[in-house]
Amino acid sequence: MADPDPTPCPAPVAAAALPVARVEPRDRRWSWTWLVPIAAVILAVVLVVQAQSERGRSINIRFEDGGGIQANDPVLYRGVQAGRVRAVTLAPDLNSVIVTAELRRDAVNLAVDGSKFWVVRPVVSLTRVSGLETLVGPRYVEVEPGPPSSILRTDFQGLERAPSGVEGTHKRRGDTAGKLSIIVEAAQRGSIGVGSPVFFRDVKVGVVTAFDLSDDFRGVNIALSIEPEYAALVRTNTEFWNAGGIGVDFGFSTGLSVKAGSIESLLGGGISFATPTKAGTKAQPGARFTLHAEPKKDWAEWSPDLSESPESN
């Protein structure tokens, strides 16, 4: 038998070396692209905190009639915008309107127990013209704050017109800044209304701030506010009279004479006063006087001596 092929088998080829993986350390260098989202987050937080710090107080005022008030109309106090109307909605019972307003942070103390709110509308009558700016501009809500020591409130019953009561008028906030608040008692209101002028020698020295019926309903109480620089003119023996209207006098020797006050008093009524030559002591806030229908002849001749005396302090 023949021997197999004596050709030797080739030697085994060594296996190729396998690649070895290397773990490189991760590059942890700072990327400036992170500043954009971080700055956005910081700005958002600052804006939220600022908005919360500047936010005032939200209140609800219920009116029987909205009177044309709308969102974004102003809330005014002493002619300064103290807030803004945020929404006007119907009450669930459909019998009233709820005005939601936000007061400025520095005006939150206007929303206290006893505060009064009303919508200012145009008023045109024979004795009074007011609110005419609302004919061409927005209506607005006006506020008369309650006593400073009252507690804060969020819900109020609005008035349908500006308050006219004299109770506590001389104690209201802001009336202590030198102004003199007094009350004159009259048989009839006549043409006198809130805003009617008060005159001394035909110079306007004050204004009518309120009126209401007396406790026994036999007369009318009219509240006056005299400007600080003229407060010393009102003394305990000062006399007041109705300066509105036109007076007619006829005599055989003098003929027909017509007496009338200033144009201002003719249009809106007015009150005048005079102080005797021998003036009394200074009138105190809340002092009461009688309002005469017309002056006596000698009142126009009075020239009061207003020099200070121990009794007047």
Image: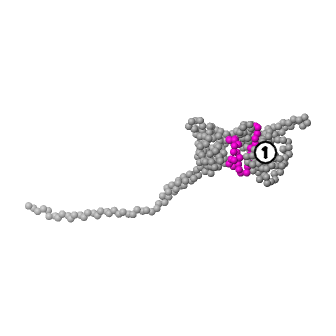
State the scheme by which the image is colored: one colour
Q: Is residue 249 left or right of residue 31?
A: right
Residue lying at the far right in this picture: please name it.
Answer: 253
**Residue 284: within the magenta?**
no
Q: How many marks?
A: 1
Which residue sits at x=75%, y=41%?
Answer: 185
SS for tag 1?
A: strand
- Write down the region rendered in magenta: 162-188
Q: Is residue 296 left or right of residue 14?
A: right
Q: Is residue 267 left or right of residue 67?
A: right
Which residue sits at x=73%, y=49%?
Answer: 179
Residue 293 visible in the shown view: yes
- Dominant secondary structure, magenta: loop
Q: In which quarter of the view is residue 165 placed?
A: top right
Which residue sits at x=77%, y=53%?
Answer: 313
Q: Is residue 21 above or below residue 142?
A: below
Residue lying at the far left in this picture: please name it.
Answer: 1
Residue 188 percent location from the top left of the image? 76, 37
Residue 200 percent location from the top left of the image? 80, 46
Q: Nearer the viewer, residue 309 or 141?
A: 309
Q: In which quarter of the view is residue 64 placed?
A: top right
Residue position for label 1: 199
Q: Amino acid at mark 1?
A: Phe
Q: Nearer the viewer, residue 115 or 73?
A: 115
Residue 180 percent location from the top left of the image? 74, 48
Residue 248 percent location from the top left of the image? 84, 36
Bin the neighbour count of mark 1 within 10 Å (Cα to Cα): few under 14, some 14-19, many 20 and up: many
Q: Is residue 49 above or below residue 10?
A: above
**Residue 185: within the magenta?**
yes
Q: Nearer the viewer, residue 273 or 74?
A: 273
